[in-house]
Amino acid sequence: MKRTRLPGVLLALALAGCAPAAAIAADRPAFRDRPPEDEFIYFVLPDRFENGDPANDRGGLRGGRLDHGFDPTHKGFYHGGDLKGLTARLDYIQGLGATAIWLGPIYQNKPVQGPPGGESAGYHGYWITDFLNVDPHFGTRAELKAFVDAAHARGMKVYLDIITNHTADVIRYRECPPFQCPYRSHADFPYSTQGGPDGPRINEGFRGIAPPHQTEENFARLTRPDFAYTPFVPEAERNVKNPAWLNDPIYYHNRGETTFQGENSLFGDFAGLDDLFTEHPRVVQGMIEIFGSWIDDFGIDGFRIDTARHVNPEFWQAFVPAMLERARARGIPNFHIFGEVFDPDPGALATFTRVDGFPTVLDFAFQSAVTDVVARGAPTSRLARLFQMDVLYEGGADTALRSPTFLGNHDMGRFAFFIRERHPGASDEEVLKRVLLGHAMMMFGRGVPTIYYGDEQGFVGDGGDQDARENMFPSRVASYNDNRLVGTGATTAVANFDTAHPIYRALAGMARIRAADPALRRGRQQVLNYGEEPGLFAIARHAPDGRGQTLIVFNTADAPLDANVWIDPALARFKSVHGSCAPAPAAPGSYRVRLAPLEYIVCRSLPAE
């Protein structure tokens, strides 16, 4: 297996620093100057999008599916999508109006892992063994460069999905079989003894992992990794990880399985995956070197960071500034970093911007609120309370403006599934209206709209995880192909790149509206009207230059709406952008709206005559 050598971090920064800032800016393509809030993100898992090269379906490996991981009939194995296929479909993605592509992890993975009878493949990309190379199932580094260059040539950005919390499941513990090793706490299994407080003394002089002690000098005294369990690497996998330092168990927590509660949420193995010792200075510097090289080599425009909440704050406080600096040195001033913190509580999300130092996080609170309101019948005050919490973020509303908003994803499931789940007897027309209403809230509200691939083709899925990862190219998975899609009579048994699909067309129209109006991308959001039942929800987006507003009004009820919206008394004229907008207020400060069930309007104010 070919190994790629890392460029020297200090050398790269020094060389970049030799170029005057003005010269770097002058050579910078125009898309680099767009701030994150201007983007419309398309999130795609490469294995499930398009198969451009069937020759790489097995990743160059021989044997059966438990060796190479390819089985297009099973939802948990590789299906054949790759970088060539993704590149060939850029017209389709750009036609939707997307300006940035969030690419699921493309690093080389352990092909198959899991207990006997429960095996699945690393098609999703989150079981990394080689952090420096592209998984052969997806293609090559040259093909990744061709994809990035092709996207950049269109003015589109590329965000990589990265993982620093864990690697693939390689390390074993002598005391227990795989996946059956319960978490062993710091109190019961300190670093200073082997196998518990009564065991023999080890790691003499090691002062623990509290922030003041996260130094090279202290960690040089941590020489034994067998404080809780006795970790070892099977002979066949001794050198499977790249860079080579990742093969040493000393750089992992080695405390057993997490239950995602308390202490073990940070230090436990996530479903058997080897949990990196992210307090260790070598791990911190190693991850900076690894992911800095992807910026250097490919000119990547941003990172989505997986499992951010399962890593200690001190790691992020070092890693995030290093990545932003690396990007600036590469001529990428608007590098977008957003962390995955799987929590619907805006206070919990905000903590990671205030303590851990994330510029933004994925807005799980928005996802939860819109799903409650549009799919589950919650009152529109639910949305008002959500937006009131924007002040909690470091940077307040400005940070919320740059945070990616979304309705569903590859882990929790699709938005259309949540709607069908709550409204099993709803007509196809009603389901489509609810889907479009939720997307309108995402496209026109504050934040960076992020669509999960396939949602624009009416994909529904059967739940989360593997059940929400259908193919865009013809699928051979029975549990995908029996799904009833939204807005079409097609199934996933055929290719789904239909630019005439009603959701695709609607989203493309929303994207055009958003792209044409700075207020919808960069403008301050003001909540105008809401209630304690389904129905009226109105917001205004203020033009950044102070010249006017864009009014967006939603009807979340299944009955017509006739209501007055509280507006700025100075606004005297409006034009319809979407739907039917009254040309003038009913009276200064009062704007009458009439909406059909589950509809919305977008109205732009005009200068007074």
Image: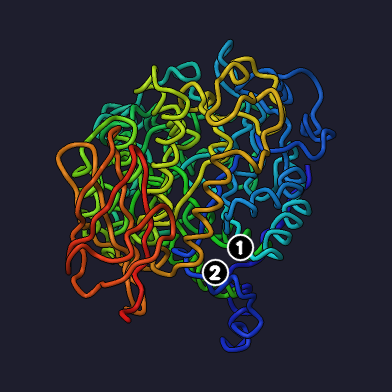
Mark drawn on residue 326: 2
Q: Nearer the viewer, residue 104 or 175?
A: 104
Q: Quadrant of the N terminus?
A: top right
Q: Is residue 142 left or right of residue 592?
A: right
Q: Nearer the viewer, residue 274 or 80?
A: 80
Q: Is residue 383 above or below residue 291?
A: above
Q: Nearer the viewer, residue 509 or 410?
A: 509
Give whichever of discs 1 and 2 has the lower sequence position: 1
Mark drawn on residue 295: 1
Label 1 residue SS: helix
Q: Is residue 302 left or right of residue 203?
A: right
Which amino acid type is marked by label 1? Ile
The answer to whether the residue labelled 1 contacts the one labelled 2, judged by CB atoms less than 8 Å apart, is yes
Residue for point 24% across, 65% down: 585
Q: Position of residue 311 (x, y in %)?
A: 38, 46
Circle 2 packing at 10 Å, graded few (<14), some (14-19), many (20+), is many
